[in-house]
Amino acid sequence: MSDWYMQPGHGVRFEWGPTGAQRLAPGVSCLVVVDVLSFTTSVTVAVESGTCVFPYPWRDETASAFAGQMAAELAVGRRAATTTSPWSLSPAALRRAPFTPRLVLPSPNGSAIAAAADGSTVVAGCLRNATALGRWLALHGYGTPAHPVAVIAAGERWPDGSLRPALEDLLGAGAIIAELQAQGVGPLSPEAAAARTCFERNPDVGRAVATCSSGLELAQGGFADDVAIASKVGDSKTVPVLIDRAFTRAGPHGTTG
């Protein structure tokens, strides 16, 4: 079978959504999940406080059972948060919520992408940790033809379930790819280079995220604080790595802590 879709020969690759992740994962050493206005920004906020985050692909009764198995609290949807269930996919709500050492975070896109890794290293990336993540990847030898990395923009969904490419995820992926190139790794696939260019040619990333479709949806729903947190490029030094089913903060030399 032809492997044209795997962007062969390039150290840094880029694709969209769970299907893109499934296609590229067998040929890479590391998979970077990027879901700027939801999953991965929430993961960075939780992990930088010391919480281990378990991704889970469904927000139904099985999520509660899984949380019980993991001895973890269960996050709910943004609009379902209460005083008794204060953890949600809202980064601002996670900052306000009481500390919990273990949290199950249901997310169909983010979790599905993480699950596609098939033995590869999985990390959570966003605008907030793009600089730290790009440097961490380069430090650990990812992003070369021998150890390629695939940066996967999660995107959103239209009502019919089809993928809606989301500008904020393209910008987040581009920011990570730009830092990888600055660290001297590569070569970039044409897809990865296009994502990098989108980020580098955008004069005001924060404004772009705030005024794009996804940003307007959240702001109009009362979650403008989430957009503000997610838009701060390089605001976090936390690199969440998936280890033993949970995202945990990576140390400077690949250890957790």
Image: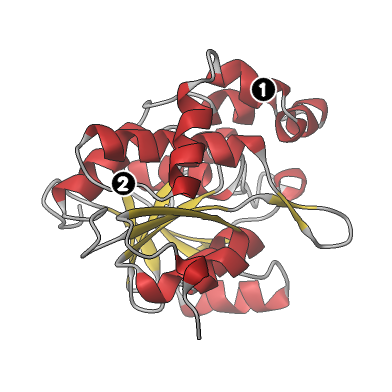
Q: Amino acid at mark 1?
A: Ala
Residue 248 relative to residue 68: left or right: left
Which sits in the foreground, 186 or 33?
186
Q: How is the image coloured?
A: secondary structure
Can you name the residue that lies furthest to the bottom here?
1
The percent position of residue 35, horizontal first and vertical second, equals 56, 47
Residue underneath mark 2: 239
Q: Say which mark, if any, is on residue 256.
A: none
Establish if 177 lies above or below 209.
below
**Measured from the top left, where is residue 143 in percent x and y?**
27, 53
Residue lying at the far left in this picture: please name it: 253
Q: Counting residues from the N terminus, which is met first, the one under dot 1 or under dot 2?
A: 1
Taking the image as shown, residue 121 lies to the left or right of residue 39, namely left
Left or right of 108, for residue 171: left
Which residue was labeled with disc 1? Answer: 210
In this rendering, the answer to whether 102 lies above or below 66 is above
Image x and y of residue 90, in percent? 62, 41
**Amino acid residing under circle 2:** Val
Using the image, determine if residue 230 lies above or below residue 134. Answer: above
Residue 234: image location, x then y, percent = 36, 27
Residue at the (21%, 65%) spot, across then down: 146
Mark 1–mark 2 distance (CA, rounded to whole Å): 24 Å
